Amino acid sequence: MNNLKIEKLDNFGRGICYVNDKITFVTDALPNEVVNIKITKEYKKYNEAIVTKYVQKSSNRIESICPYYKECGGCNLLHMSYANTLIFKKNKLESIIYKYAKITKEIDVVPSKDFNYRNKVTLKIKNNKFGYYKEATHQIIPIKHCAIAETSINDFIKDIPSLNIKNGELVIRSNYNNELLLWIKTKEHIKPDIDYLKQHHKIVGIILNNKVINGDSSYIELINHQLFTVSYDSFFQINRDICSKLFKLINKYITPDEVILDLYCGVGTLGINASKEAKKTFGIEIVKNAVLNAITNAKINKRDNIYYMLGDASICLPKIKEHINTIILDPPRAGLDKTTLKTILEFKPDKIIYVSCDPMTLARDLNELKEFYNIDVIKGLDMFPYTSHVECFCVLKIK
Ligand SMILES: C[S@@+](CC[C@H](N)C(=O)[O-])C[C@H]1O[C@@H](n2cnc3c(N)ncnc32)[C@H](O)[C@@H]1O
């Protein structure tokens, strides 16, 4: 198909054009570009396509700095300038929030350090080749470095062969001090060259499946003068710069002497950060190691008024019998389940601070909450630069 004009971007950053009136999503194409395309998948209601030739390029197009970009399934906006990715995310958030929550708001996106921001990567290993999967496949794209991963992770990548893993998965996490925690998942019997690796990298722990084979099972992260123990299987925000900005943003909306609930609290980050002057804080989390980390983290940050519950949010929440002033919510991508949403509405906290990594489920939940709450603030935070993902921050106040 020749000389097609890209009209706009979809929510994944793909260009949209029409082929015989059928919507067609084109990878690596920008608005106003004129392109020749090849349709790669045809569905009843839409096509997917790739560009075979750029007849007219957009002035917003830049050369990707990543040699794996065309094939790797990781980033999908490396052909746009960073400033343009922020405009894309602003438009995306505003349109999703309007479409699914019927809320009209100007939504600014807080920028991030743009490259080398990821403190965690998960690499797949097949027949000694390691890398990321090609988009929508299980085919490995071998890599030697990753433009969005922290420098200490990139320094380690060249030494992955010393782990002697033929098939499996490797999670590499790095902290503020460039220390690394390695989590190897494999069915094979492996013999990593630990002495060599420890001579060349600051490795705090190596976990094989669920067993510590060297050092510790956790590392320590530092955000805004607060320390957080994070075990290999606990969640932690993947962008330290944005995590720091998120902490500051949350604290703008917290007043002294509140009773706070940190729902989906992970290792306790958001609740500990917000509770310096709180009357009391509760935390609820389903991963056991994360709750154990949170208990340790409350102690090391000198919070003696935080109480954690281990279990499903929908089951633990009704056990709290006190009036909550602020609920800080940071659920997984699926957002709130119906029972939890209903219980929150029964609790009627004065304020809800909703942090979300999926604007669609956020908009769905805001649509339910808006009958009882005014949406005071919505912001985007660029937690995942050069990908189409965006973190959201909302403050809701009771009507
Ligand atoms: C997006 S993370 C947020 C963690 C934490 N607020 C932070 O900033 O690091 C979501 C957390 O919810 C937890 N989680 C997932 N499903 C849950 C459930 N049904 N009940 C309680 N916690 C859950 C996950 O284990 C994860 O730690």
Image: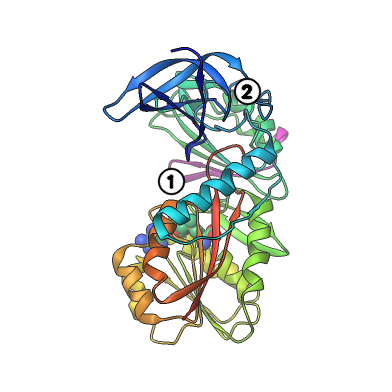
Q: Is residue 182 left or right of residue 264?
A: right
* Residue type, label 1: Asn
Q: Taking 84 as reference, is 350 above or below it?
A: below
Find disc 1 in the rendering and name its residue: 210
Residue span colored magenta: 199-214
* Residue type, label 2: Lys
Find disc 2 in the rendering and name its residue: 144
Count every numbered label the image shows and give the total: 2
Q: CA distance from mark 1 to mark 2?
A: 27 Å
214 or 95: which is nearer to us?
95
Q: Position of residue 5 (x, y in %)?
A: 52, 23
Mark 2, Cα crowd under 10 Å, few <14 / some 14-19 / many 20+, is some
Mark 1, Cα crowd under 10 Å, few <14 / some 14-19 / many 20+, is few
Label 2 sits on a secondary structure element that is loop
* Quadrant field for ligand 1: bottom left
Residue drawn at x 47%, y 62% is 103
Residue drawn at x 51%, y 82% is 325
Residue drawn at x 63%, y 81% is 255
Q: In the current view of this chain or complex, which residue is farthest to the front?
A: 21
Label 1 sits on a secondary structure element that is loop
Is residue 116 visible to us here?
no
Residue 380 is one of the magenta-drawn residues: no
Q: Is residue 261 left or right of residue 247?
A: left
50 or 258: which is nearer to us?
50
Residue drawn at x 41%, y 81% is 348
Mark toward the viewer: 1 or 2: 2
Q: Position of residue 292 (x, y in %)?
A: 49, 65
167 or 361: which is nearer to us?
361
